[in-house]
Amino acid sequence: MSTTPAIDSCTVETSDGVKLHTKIFKPNPYQEGEEIIKNGSWVVVLVHPYSILGGCQSLLKGIASGVSRKGYKTLTFDMRGVGRSSGKPSITGFKEVEDVVAVCKWACQNLAVNKILLVGSSAGAPIAGSAVDQVEQIVGYVSIGYPFGLLASVLFGRHHKNILKSPKPKLFIMGTQDGFTTVKQLNNKLRSAAGRVETHLIEGIGHFELEGPAYDSQMVIFIAEFLSTL
């Protein structure tokens, strides 16, 4: 029997009036009922890569579908100025933090959930990280290719402290040939991190490779394993 998730679309409005095109991936009701009931209080919110370089929610469809097949409601959305969302993108991603907060609060109010795992990909990782402590129901965070390196820090450096100081559990996934962040830079940053911190390093893989569909199934496994520990 098919376990393809049902996908609904809606619009979420931010505190400053931006309208965000959002997709909800719902576990197929014909899946094993016990798994859906067990995971029913959760939603996984995915934050896409850098808007200015073409990041959009469709890049996360594979991960969203896979996580939904594990029995979790999953949300993707286009940040401001992307696709059918209104507004304009910002260079440093600070306005987009408001987008993440709005989607998370909407999910709690409309999807009968009270626990959120926030997942950010590439530049979506620092943006998501800055939202983690702004919503009480966010109980964990996953980064896929967080750009901690020196060049990327010109744009996103002011986000770093927000996730590093958060006491909430954190998982950082990165390829060892990331290009934006070296393994040494990642480890140096995470030494100062509060709370529980885990890493998954994927040998020989670059930044954009990790974002590609070939690794979606691996990301789903990492996310589901991390969720099971929260």
Image: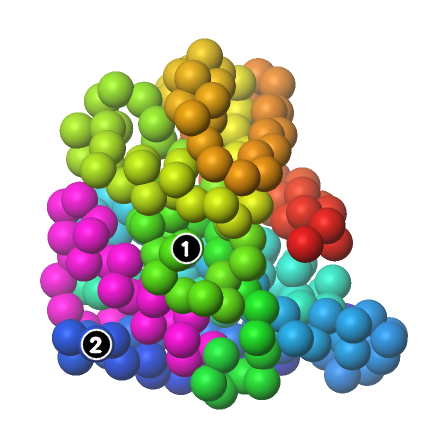
The answer to whether residue 1 is seen in the rendering is: no
Instruction: Look at the picture and state if 194 lies above or below 115.
Output: above
Expressed as whole percent of the image width and height from the top left, the position of residue 58 reads 43, 60
Q: Is residue 170 left or right of residue 4?
A: left
The answer to whether residue 222 is seen in the rendering is: yes
For the record, the magenta segment spans 83-107
Disc 2 marks which residue?
A: 15
Disc 1 marks which residue?
A: 132
The amino acid type of the residue labelled 2 equals Ser
The residue carrying pointer 1 sits among few (fewer than 14), some (14 to 19) or many (20 or more) residues within 10 Å by Cα, namely many
Q: Is residue 201 left or right of residue 71?
A: left
How far apart are the alpha carbons under marks 2 and 1? 17 Å
Please say whether residue 92 is one of the residues in the magenta stretch. yes
- Provide the secondary structure element on which disc 1 rests: helix
Instruction: Look at the picture and state if 217 lies above or below 180.
Output: below
Residue sitting at 49 percent across and 79 percent down? 108
Residue sitting at 50 percent across and 68 percent down? 137
Expressed as whole percent of the image width and height from the top left, the position of residue 129 reads 38, 47
Residue sitting at 25 percent across and 51 percent down? 51
Which quadrant of the structure image shows residue 31? bottom right
Residue sitting at 56 percent across and 45 percent down? 169
